[in-house]
Image: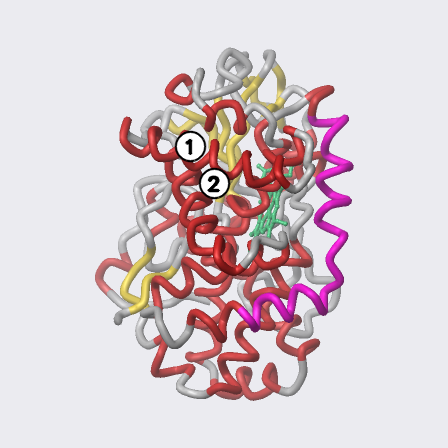
Amino acid sequence: MSFPHDAAAESVFPRDAVEAVTHPDPYPFYRQLRQERPLFFDTRLGLWVASSHAAVSAALVHPALRVRPPAEPVPRALQGGAAGEVFAQLVRMTDGDFHAVHKPGVARAARRWALADVARAAEDAARDLRPRLPVNEFTAALPVQTMARLLGVPEGQREATCRWAAQFTQGIAPGADAQAVALANAAAAALMAQGRAQGLSAVQAANRIGFMQQALDAGSGLLGHVALHLTQDAQQAAAADASPEAMCALVREVERCAAPIQNTRRFAAEALTLRGQPIAAGQALLLVLASANRDETLNTQPDRFHVHREGGRSVGFGAGLHACPGAAIAVEMVAACALWMRAAGQFDAYFGRCIGFRPLPNARIPVFEQ
Ligand code: HEM
């Protein structure tokens, strides 16, 4: 599935797997990587790039491949600030004993919501935001507004809470400037105070922020890709409108086909061999999840969009110890939002034409003409 808007640009391959994230159609490039060099050291990027299902999946479960560089568990720019303190307690950003002790509690916290609650929260957020936001602001706000409702943030605090979650997310991103880090510190302090006031421990309060942060870009990307698919294929859209189950099945196939988190990173804590390649201690790897999903060894006819495919598999929500505990929430949230919006009318006109992707190194988030 590609979303062409510039035939000339589309015919030129991206220079690397990071540029691919915002390329009009990265999938032929990913296919070439899988066929010719499924795991190689990219000198432009200065890291290993894994694109096949075998290489990505081996890396996701390798015990010496960590989510942070061992020498810098918290990014230097965040050390000593409130954002750094939160970062250090996120299961997403930690390995070893800390992760093993706290991941089960985080996963339990994500399971506490029935999918019907998730659908209600997403519909409520859509009903509130749709009339007052242009489309790109809407896709940016919907996931975090849904999470804030699920997390019990009172109505009067919701706007500020979602703004803080966005500021935290922007400030912890690699390359954030001093002003973004300062905003992230203030946001982290405010969100921690909110969580502690709910009676949560510091780790629980930090991972409550993590829920909103993880939902933000990934959820916007998934919603955007689902909207693109629905506006481009009237027949499949009509079939998806038939029931929540049908819409969820479409959302799952969109996620497999157009993974909103195109890649994730790992860092070698010690020298290791992966798929026959020697990786030195300290080297980084880019795991191209979106490419692995299109590998024939993971899915038959992987480039075909097939809602009712038998045994469809995706690594788009990660795998192994760091697998996403919010996958079911994400699918339900986007499906409920899409169903509500389509029933409310003007869906195709609201989403309009895709004119590119937000300039991010890992999340592929469609930008619509507005
Ligand atoms: C479309 C939406 C989403 C996508 C595509 C997505 C994808 C991912 C991926 C790929 C990872 C693994 C990262 C890695 O191993 O490097 C991850 C981890 C995580 N996700 Fe999600 N996610 C989504 C929504 C959510 C939501 C709604 C929540 C909140 C409930 C959530 C909570 C988390 C957490 C806490 C982790 C860290 C788990 C760990 O490191 O042990 N995600 N997600």
Rendered residue at 43%/79% (across/down): 231
Q: Is residue 305 left or right of residue 129?
A: right
Amino acid at dot 2: Glu
Among the 4 quarters of the image, the one containing residue 210: top right
Local secondary structure at mark 1: helix
Rendered residue at 54%/28% (across/down): 86
Q: Characterize the local packing of mark 1: few (<14), some (14-19) or many (20 or more) Cα atoms within 10 angstroms.
A: many
Answer whether residue 132 is visible to the viewer in this image.
yes
Task: Check disc 1 and report the residue beneath it.
Answer: 172
**Where is residue 298 shown, x and y percent of the image?**
66, 52
Quarter that holds the C terminus:
bottom left
Mark-to-mark CA distance, 1 and 2? 35 Å
Residue 221 higher or lower than 206, as above or below: below
Rendered residue at 56%/79% (across/down): 339
Answer whether residue 294 is visible to the viewer in this image.
no
Residues drawn in magenta = 99-124
**Where is residue 37 shown, x and y percent of the image?**
48, 36
Task: Check disc 2 and report the residue beneath it.
Answer: 36
